[in-house]
Image: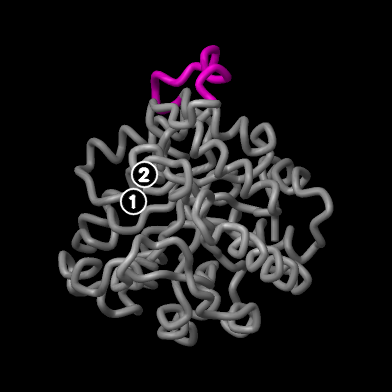
Amino acid sequence: MYRTDAVREILSWYEGENPGVKTNIARLLMHGHLAGTGRLVILPVDQGFEHGPARSFGPNPAAYDPHYLYELAIEAGVNGYAAPLGSLQQGADTFAGELPLILKMNSANSLTASAIQDQAVTASVEDALRLGCVGVGFTIYPGSDDFYEMMEELQEISLEAKACGLMTVVWSYPRGGKISKDGETALDIVAYAAHMAALIGANIIKVKLPTDMIDLKDAKASYEGIARGSIAERVRHIMQSSFGGKRLVVFSGGASKDRDALMDEVRGIRDGGGNGSIIGRNSFQRSKPEALALLKDVLDVYA
């Protein structure tokens, strides 16, 4: 597999990782329309656990079928597709080798009585190997009552995955504790979450796009000299917090929004030095022609 200079530089950041992990990072970076650029667009479809089937797929019923989601990712030319075990299994044979897969290994649901503070492990590293995945994905909730246990779970899974040559993608979504509801996307909180994911050993970090807000009282003085008025400036700080930009960071597309708002976010991520986007509901909830057109525009911005 040919690697561009951009990809070679990125791989050099991951000191201490074995050749298998670096090979799988390269497989992801060298796939699709952004191959070799160092940028990433990933299709994630794990919302069925979180929100239920109708809320996730009702706007575009074709997306109830996991084969449709594989086809969307392949036809769009994104770098990879991330989903829970059942979704990946239902299509793994038909589409074997056609795009890099990431097995999302833990999930929560919206049927519990209290606010979600933890997620259940729903798959294994063995499953990821059996399905030919390039890596595993895992969500942590910095600030939650169960965060320490989640970190320990991630450490064990990451150790096992990397020993098998699989990379780790960490969804780092703060909530609970001292964090206000609006503060879940505050600049200081998202930067803290990204930094903790890097410290735990994430190869790719997924965070929400930060707002121009500082949530923690103790952090306000530290942010007086940090530019944060634009999306690009806030993304630049997230990258700075992720080992000085030496970790791949992708930003969530978030809740469904209109095309112009999404494209403004994508341009801000690009201009701030972010590595790309991980866009779920904003793609698969649209009809396929509309989703393909949108993803083409997103890929063109990053290219």
Relative to 89, say whether 238 is above or below: above
The residue at the point 32 percent across, 43 percent down is 297
> Which residue lies under the disc numbered 2?
298
Instruction: Please state the horizontal and vertical placement of residue 242, each as a whole percent of the image.
Output: 63, 38
Q: Quadrant of residue 128?
A: bottom right
| Of 275 and 54, the residue lying toward us | 54
Q: Is residue 59 left or right of residue 174?
A: left
As helix, strand or loop, the secondary structure at mark 2 comes to helix
* Quarter of the view holding residue 154: bottom right
Can residue 146 be seen?
yes
> In the image, what residue type sits under mark 2?
Val
- Whether tag 2 and tag 1 are in contact, CB under 8 A, the answer is yes
Say few, some or many: other residues with alpha carbon within 10 Å of mark 2 (under 14 / 14 to 19 / 20 or more). many
Residue 134 belongs to magenta span: no
Picture mark count? 2
- Residue 102 lies, in percent from the top left, at 54, 68
Question: Pointer 1: what residue?
Answer: 295
Residue farthest to the top, as pictured: 225
Does residue 234 appear left or right of residue 3 in this picture?
Answer: left
| Number of residues whose C-alpha sits closer than 10 Å to that of mark 1, classed few (under 14), some (14–19) or many (20 or more) | many
Q: CA distance from mark 2 to mark 1?
A: 5 Å
Magenta stretch in the rendered image: 219-232
Disc 1 marks a residue whose amino acid type is Leu
Is 41 in front, or is 104?
A: 104
23 with respect to 178 (left or right): right
Q: Is 221 on the left-hand or right-hand side of 22?
A: left
User: Is residue 292 visible in the rendered structure shown here?
Assistant: no
Would you identify the image quadrant in which residue 10 lies?
Answer: top right
Residue 11, percent across and down? 73, 48
* Identity of the residue drawn at 78% across and 45% down: 12
